[in-house]
Amino acid sequence: MVASAAIGSVGVVAGTVRLLPWVLDPGVPLLVAAPFARGLAAVTLEAAILLGWPVGWAVACFRSVEIGEARVLVSLGEAPLFTVSKLAPQGVILAVVLAAVGLVYGGDANAPGRVATELIAQARTSCRAARRTSTYSIPFTGLTWLCAPDRPPRLVGWSPGGLTGTVMTAAEARIAGDFRALELGDAHVFVPGSPPIALHARTLSLRGLAPWARASTLPAALRAAMVAIGAWASASIAAYCVLQHAARTRLGAIALGASGPLGALALLRFIERADVGAPALVALPLAASVCSFACSAVLRALRCLRWRRPTASK
């Protein structure tokens, strides 16, 4: 928990720095930042648990070895594997929390247009409460609410896609989850030209647009489950290897605990960028386990080299 809190605090600072320009911008209502802040909080908490959980178990086991508690347990006939198995209740809780957080983040990543629609709705609510003429910008969308105390809010912006120079206004808007469609209510469209064209529609749907943002194609539930399993596998392997004296220093224990999650995150990033499909997610726990065992082997090899050097010098 301490490791997760430490890593999470770093993520909070980074997320705050990213969110601060919106909070300080008078043209962006404070409520508009809420959906984006939720996404930042979810990804920060996911990274904190994914990395902090294995590091915490590795450091705790190293402390047990350092004070001699692990040696006493071994002398009483308790195998390191059984010692690690006693951490299962804590692991269940952490896995459930990590999966729940990953489900929230994965849901938003799969449908960024839904988050943008929430931004539009939050800004409209703030616009209704405006006591003077003002404008509220909506991040990511290029749309702006025109607010006046004696008039209903009006949304205005440039048309997306290939309609270059076309200006649209509407009373409300909904963006498809993949950003490829836009639905406007009480829409007015102004197309420049000779002569210019002005259109009005009670409901206007624009489909087949170039996406304004990339949506994740990975199933949120499968992603959350594989991340949680990968974290548990890394934590268990790291704890076992530390009890087997793979790490002789606290820094080595931290490296051993972090290797699995970092390997899983690297593979997850590759899967998302390469768009290789959901079945590749099954490899996440395997990648985490391989990286943990590899780090353990490296630490043991380094220790053997240090032991051999004095002998060679004699």
Image: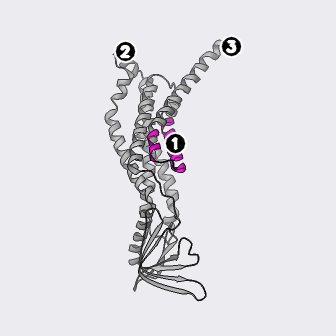
Q: Amino acid at mark 3?
A: Ser
Cα–Cα span, label 3 and label 2: 36 Å
Location of the C terminus (image quadrant): top right
- Label 2 belongs to which residue? 75
Specify whether residue 268 is painted magenta. Answer: yes
Which residue is painted at 44% across and 34% down in the image? 234
Decide: is 163 above or below 113. Answer: below
Q: Residues within 10 Å of mark 3 (few under 14, many from 20)?
A: few
- Label 1 belongs to which residue? 267
Q: Amino acid at mark 1?
A: Leu
Specify whether residue 62 is painted magenta. Answer: no
Front-lying residue, 302 or 310: 302
Q: Earlier in the sequence, mark 3 or mark 2?
A: 2
**Residue furthest toward the right?**
313
Which residue is painted at 40% across and 49% down in the image? 102
Q: Which residues are magenta?
A: 258-283
Return the x and y of residue 35 as percentages of the image width and height. 42, 62
Q: Amino acid at mark 2?
A: Ser
Decide: is 169 above or below 108. Answer: below
Which numbered mark, 3 or 1, is in the foreground of this view?
Answer: 1
Which residue is painted at 41% across and 42% down in the image? 226
Return the x and y of residue 90 as percentages of the image width and height. 33, 36
- Label 3 belongs to which residue? 313
Q: Earlier in the sequence, mark 3 or mark 1?
A: 1
Mark 3 secondary-structure assignment: helix
Return the x and y of residue 306 as percentages of the image width and height. 61, 20
Cα–Cα span, label 1 and label 2: 40 Å
Cα–Cα span, label 3 and label 1: 42 Å
Mark 2 secondary-structure assignment: helix
Which numbered mark, 1 or 2, is in the foreground of this view?
Answer: 1
